[in-house]
Image (cartoon, grey):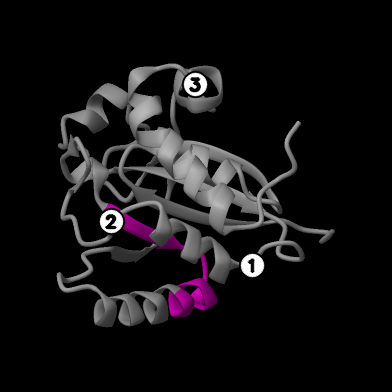
Amino acid sequence: MSDSLETATFGGGCFWCIEAAFEELAGVETVTSGYAGGHTEDPTYEEVCTGNTGHAEVVQVEYDPDVIDYQELIEVFFTVHDPTQLNRQGPDVGTQYRSIVLYHDDTQRRIAEEFVDALDRVYDDDVVTELEPIETFYRAEEKHQNYFAKNPNDAYCTFHAQPKVEKVREKFDAKPAN
């Protein structure tokens, strides 16, 4: 295990779904739902939902680079959402649901750019994922943290988060079951 954790930030639709997917991964220590990429200071969920804050619903992932690296996190991210959908994922529509990678350093930026370039050659439609440096991350309200784990029978979670969790379990190195 590494002496220090690293941080990655991604947005690809509702943070409940993305959070649940990343929580499955071996080497991921914490996943925090929040808001980033906008201009409003300390926004609330209700404000972000208006689409007027500029923020996206995102997750901040703290991970052990000795167990999982950023390249694999990027692969997971692009596996659990559709990067060709502009300002939406499934039933969620608006700029707050856009596909975005908020990189923390030049290495993350380079890896994300190379991955997006490769994806652009695979998809028929353009990859619309935004790549931006992280400026400020605002933690979402407590009711949004670990939402899927707390509400596995919620209809939204059943239809949208569960399939992403199952995909991660099938394709990647998941944490052992409790």
Q: Which mark is residue 84?
A: none
Q: Which mark is residue 152?
A: 3
Neighbour class for label 3 at 10 Å: few (<14), some, many (≥20)?
few
Residue 100 lies in what quarter of the image? bottom left
| Circle 1: residue type | Asp
Residue 155 percent across, percent down from the top left:
34, 19
State the count of labels: 3
Neighbour class for label 1 at 10 Å: few (<14), some, many (≥20)?
some
Residue 49 percent across, percent down from the top left:
22, 29
Residue 71 lies in what quarter of the image? bottom right
Q: Earlier in the sequence, mark 1 or mark 2?
A: 1
- Out of 14 and 103, give the one closest to the viewer: 14
> What span is in magenta?
99-111
Name the residue rendered at 40%, 52% in the picture.
80
Q: Which residue is mark 2?
A: 82
What is the C-alpha distance between the residues marked 3 and 2?
Answer: 23 Å
Q: Which residue is mark 1?
A: 69
Query: SS class of the residue under badge 2?
Result: loop
What is the C-alpha distance between the residues marked 3 and 1?
Answer: 28 Å
| Circle 3: residue type | Pro
Quadrant assignment for the N terminus? bottom right
Query: SS class of the residue under badge 3?
Result: loop
Query: SS class of the residue under badge 1?
Result: loop
Neighbour class for label 2 at 10 Å: few (<14), some, many (≥20)?
some
78 inside magenta stretch: no
Q: Residue furthest front?
A: 170
Name the residue rendered at 39%, 61% in the picture.
78
